[in-house]
């Protein structure tokens, strides 16, 4: 019987495995085209993990190592091993992945994709009506997948490593903060025509700058009326697949305490006073006692208020015309941030209140100076 081959540590090597003189390992096999291929690794364990990938691809008829895998297959392969993606982020990625699978570009072999191909694809998507923000998500998906192929020595360069802003115009919807007059007019309209269903929800969003999923993630234990503050510890979310689930705040800085203005304090008192007492409190990932409940005594989620605000927007235009901008929960968040900044709060405190991980987000995206506020600041300095 032939003696079994072993590595320098005495471990038996399988068929096709070899330890090289420098101590690294390689594995030789025949691909689906009957060509001899090799993969390499620093350790035997790493090599055998790669062998499993090769065997799985060969069984599926995919020649990953020769770049014969398609763009869509590469994206799927990447997300099979990607585990640290938040659920909400994965939802956005899921839509992008679906588009990649449905597009003819998704059928291209990765070895044939060039920089010009990637740019032409994104331009064609934009010409078909996709917004740049949507294409940005698609780019983040394919760029990371192709980077994995580069790291695996399957392709030399990543054709998706370019600035999309140099290729496509910025066509994103600009969220303008509401002026003080617009805020008063909108709240009065909601009070007059909105049946008080979401009046307090809107007041609180306008007075705290919370993300709507943070608002509906609040439980009774997160409310400190005596101290006039709330504790932000979670987001409450819902999808078609998952009726309810808890997510951590969007960033690590999202865990924070928010002081309450008089208007927000009174709104929370009304919410607490009018909150029904369900026979059975809904339990979501260990959390219960949610402050905001719908007509069925179940926790509200973002979809509830978004639908309500769209309905109220249509009603407003039927009555008054188009003198009010489109208002969403995120516009209220912009409005709070802008009001705070124009009132003179320091930028680090504002960053904390907004739960931003980077102060540039606070300044560059969520604040909108009007001429009047600039003039007031100018006069305060020079007069």
Image (tube, grey):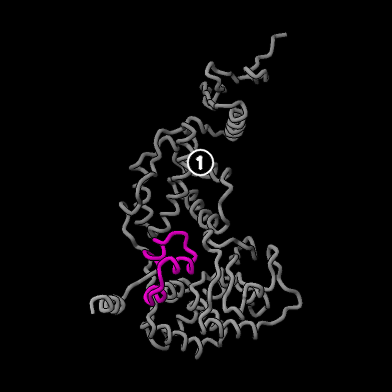
**Quadrant of the rendered image containing residue 128:** bottom left
Q: Residue furthest right?
A: 279
**Quadrant of the rendered image containing residue 270:** bottom right
- SS at badge 1: helix
In the image, the segment drawn in magenta is 338-366
On the question of residue 237 being in view, the answer is no
Give 183 or 195, whichever is nearer the viewer: 183
Q: Quadrant of the C terminus?
A: bottom left
Image x and y of residue 60, in percent: 59, 35
Local crowd size for mark 1, using a 10 Å CA cut-off: few (<14), some (14–19), many (≥20): many
Residue drawn where x is 43% and y is 57% of the image: 134
Residue drawn where x is 56% and y is 62% of the image: 249
Image x and y of residue 112, in percent: 40, 36
Q: Which residue is mark 1?
A: 74
Give 382 or 271, whichever is nearer the viewer: 382
Q: Residue furthest bottom?
A: 192
Residue drawn where x is 37% and y is 75% of the image: 342
Give 351 or 330, whichever is nearer the viewer: 351
Residue drawn where x is 68% and y is 78% of the image: 297
Q: Main secondary structure of the magenta part?
A: helix
Question: Where is 292 relative to 47, above or below?
Answer: below
């Amino acid at each position: 019987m032939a003696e079994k081959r072993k590595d320098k540590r005495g471990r038996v090597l399988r068929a096709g495995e070899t330890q090289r003189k420098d101590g690294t390992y390689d594995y030789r096999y025949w691909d689906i085209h009957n060509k001899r291929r090799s993969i390499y690794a620093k350790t035997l364990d790493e090599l055998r993990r790669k062998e499993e990938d090769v065997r799985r691809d060969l069984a599926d008829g995919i020649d990953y190592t020769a770049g014969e895998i398609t763009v869509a297959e590469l994206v799927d392969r990447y997300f099979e091993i990607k585990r640290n993606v938040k659920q909400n982020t994965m939802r956005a990625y899921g839509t992008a992945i679906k588009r990649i699978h449905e597009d003819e570009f998704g059928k291209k072999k990765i070895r044939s994709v060039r920089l010009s191909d990637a740019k032409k694809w994104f331009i064609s998507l934009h010409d078909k009506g996709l917004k740049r923000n949507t294409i940005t998500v698609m780019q983040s998906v394919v760029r990371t997948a192709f980077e994995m192929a580069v790291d695996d020595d399957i392709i030399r360069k990543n054709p998706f490593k370019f600035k999309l802003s140099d290729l496509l115009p910025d066509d994103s919807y600009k969220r303008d903060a509401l002026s003080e007059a617009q805020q008063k007019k909108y709240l009065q309209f909601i009070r007059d025509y909105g049946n008080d269903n979401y009046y307090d929800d809107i007041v609180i969003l306008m007075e705290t700058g919370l993300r709507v999923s943070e608002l509906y993630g609040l439980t009774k234990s997160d409310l400190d009326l005596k101290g006039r503050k709330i504790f932000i510890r979670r987001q409450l979310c819902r999808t078609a697949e998952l009726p309810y689930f808890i997510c951590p705040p969007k960033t690590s800085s999202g865990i924070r305490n928010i002081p309450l203005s008089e208007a927000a304090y009174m709104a929370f008192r009304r919410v607490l006073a009018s909150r029904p007492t369900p026979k059975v409190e809904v339990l979501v990932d260990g959390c219960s006692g949610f402050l905001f409940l719908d007509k069925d005594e179940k926790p509200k989620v973002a979809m509830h208020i978004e639908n309500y605000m769209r309905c109220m927007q249509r009603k407003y235009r039927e009555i008054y015309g188009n003198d009010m901008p489109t208002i969403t929960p995120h516009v209220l968040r912009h409005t709070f941030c802008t009001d705070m900044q124009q009132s003179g709060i320091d930028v680090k405190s504002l960053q904390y209140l907004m739960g931003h991980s980077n102060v540039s987000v606070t300044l560059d995206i969520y604040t909108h100076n009007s001429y009047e506020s600039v003039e007031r600041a100018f006069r305060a300095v020079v007069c």
